Image (cartoon, rainbow, N blue to C red):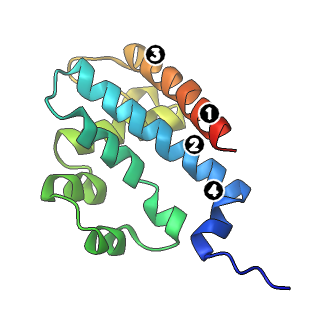
Amino acid sequence: MGDDRRPLESAASGPRWRVLGVTGLVRARTCEAIAGRLGERDPESYFLVGLLSVGDALLDTSLDALVAELPPSDEVAQALLTRAGGKGLALAVTEACERGERANAQLPSMDAQLLTVPHAAALRWSDAALTRLA
């Protein structure tokens, strides 16, 4: 008997999905925290940028194709595709945190040391969220 689950359901049951899920949730929560610390009015759109940033890998497509298919707002699309604007900068800084690149994990009003706190909190939060789903 074959596996009659849909492809996304099959992917969601494997370790690859867990890694990408954690990565997306950590990015989302970290971007959201950066937005909050900077006093941005729409932290949920920062969360969305972080979450969508792994959509290409999760769905095995290009980020350009993902953006074209959805399509998100121009601001979110540019943040994803070129790391432009405040949302793009938050994502770039979040990715630098992931890689441990302190020199690139800075915002004009927040140094890398301050960013480690929301990033670590995001790691704990995402792990707990995915554990509840398992």
Residue flagged by tag 2: what amino acid is it? Answer: Val
**Vertical relation: 91 (above or below) 101:** below
Q: Which mark is residue 117?
A: 3
Q: Which image quarter holds the C terminus?
A: top right
- Residue at the (32%, 46%) spot, across then down: 48
Callout in the foreground (2, 3): 2
Q: Which quadrant is home to the N terminus?
A: bottom right
Q: Are marks 2 and 1 in contact (CB under 8 Å)?
A: yes
Is tag 2's residue or tag 3's residue first in the polypeptide sequence?
A: 2
Which amino acid type is shown beneath numbered disc 4?
Answer: Trp
Q: Is residue 4 above or below residue 109?
A: below
Q: Nearer the viewer, residue 85 or 53?
A: 53
Please state the horizontal and vertical placement of residue 49, each as a whole percent of the image. 31, 48
6 sits left or right of 116 in the view:
right
Disc 4: which residue: 17
Give coordinates of residue 25: x percent, y percent.
Answer: 48, 41
Residue bearing mark 1: 127
- Dot 1: within a 10 Å radius of its alpha carbon, few (fewer than 14), some, or many (20 or more) residues? some
Q: Are marks 1 and 4 in contact (CB under 8 Å)?
A: no
| Of the image marks 1 and 4, the number of the one nearer the N terminus | 4
First of labels 2, 4 by sequence position: 4
Hey, what amino acid is under mark 1?
A: Asp
Q: Which residue is mark 2?
A: 22
Q: Give how far across and how far down residue 74 sits, in percent.
A: 14, 59
Q: Earlier in the sequence, mark 1 or mark 3?
A: 3
